[in-house]
Image (spheres, grey):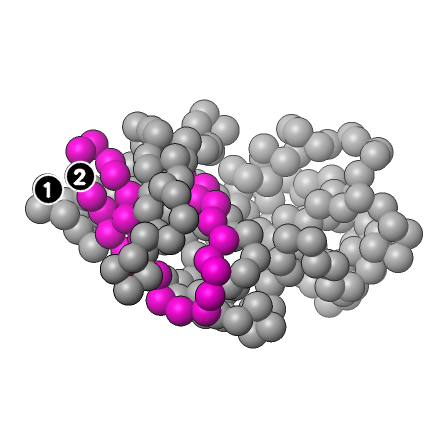
Amino acid sequence: LATETGYQLIEVFPRSPSYVAAGSPQRLPYLIAPGVEAPLDVIEGPVTFTVKSRGEQIGEPVVVEPAGGGELPRSYLPFRFTFPEPEIYDITAEYRGETLTTALQAGPADLVKLPQVGAALPTVDTATVEDHRGVDPLCTADEQCPFHSVNLADSLAAGRPVLVLVSTPRFCVSAVCGPVLEVLVEAAGGRDDIDVIHVE
């Protein structure tokens, strides 16, 4: 919701109970935008978040430092919180002396299909250079990234540490997918102590 001077808090995730699980630590990315304009490239932090349910504050306020910086073209706020029960929560964030508000609904953990902190990653076969599994192109980056040599199912069966990035950089060049893949290539390219997998 926009304030009188136009700032609004924007969720970069679905606010539905099928995405946000109650009882498990959540990491929820937010942006801040002035009115109907594009989100801010730089968020002047820190930003303090408060969670309420039925008018009562839940837990302590959470101070969030913006992330992204020079690595991504736009900074964001990685808000971390554990919502105690499945219900609707009001979220406020203090920014430049103003209170920005939004809401979300946390659902029962068994209805949320995303892997939660501490849960096992689902075993699925992913496309590789040797077996595209019908995926064409295998990688939409301008230059194919080096993270298509390992099948996720094989990595999990071997008990190896694994990092999986799901992104389509050709269709998300400037916002998240492309830049995040570039950051990952720089940070993890050539490492042999972890399996890094890019899935389109």
The disc at residue 98 is 2
Most distant residue in the bottom direction = 111
Query: Which label sits in the foreground, 2 or 1?
Result: 2
Q: Position of residue 126 (x, y in %)?
A: 75, 60
Which region of the structure is painted magenta? 77-103
Write down the residue under mark 1.
Answer: 5
Please tell me how crowded label 1 is: few (under 14), some (14-19), or many (20+) other residues with Cα within 10 Å.
few
Q: Is 21 included in the stretch rendered in magenta?
A: no
Looking at the rendered structure, the secondary structure element under dot 1 is loop
Disc 2 + disc 1, Cβ < 8 Å = yes
* Image quadrant in which you'd find residue 97: top left
Q: Is 80 included in the stretch rendered in magenta?
A: yes
Q: Position of residue 88 (x, y in %)?
A: 35, 67
Q: Position of residue 174 (x, y in %)?
A: 43, 41
Looking at marks 2 and 1 on the same chain, the residue that comes earlier in the sequence is marked by: 1
- Taking depth in this image into account, of 174 and 125 the one nearest to the observer is 125
- Taking depth in this image into account, of 136 and 115 the one nearest to the observer is 115
Residue 31 visible from this viewpoint: no
Q: Position of residue 109 (x, y in %)?
A: 57, 68
Q: Residue at x 28, y 64 (%)?
A: 54
The disc at residue 17 is none
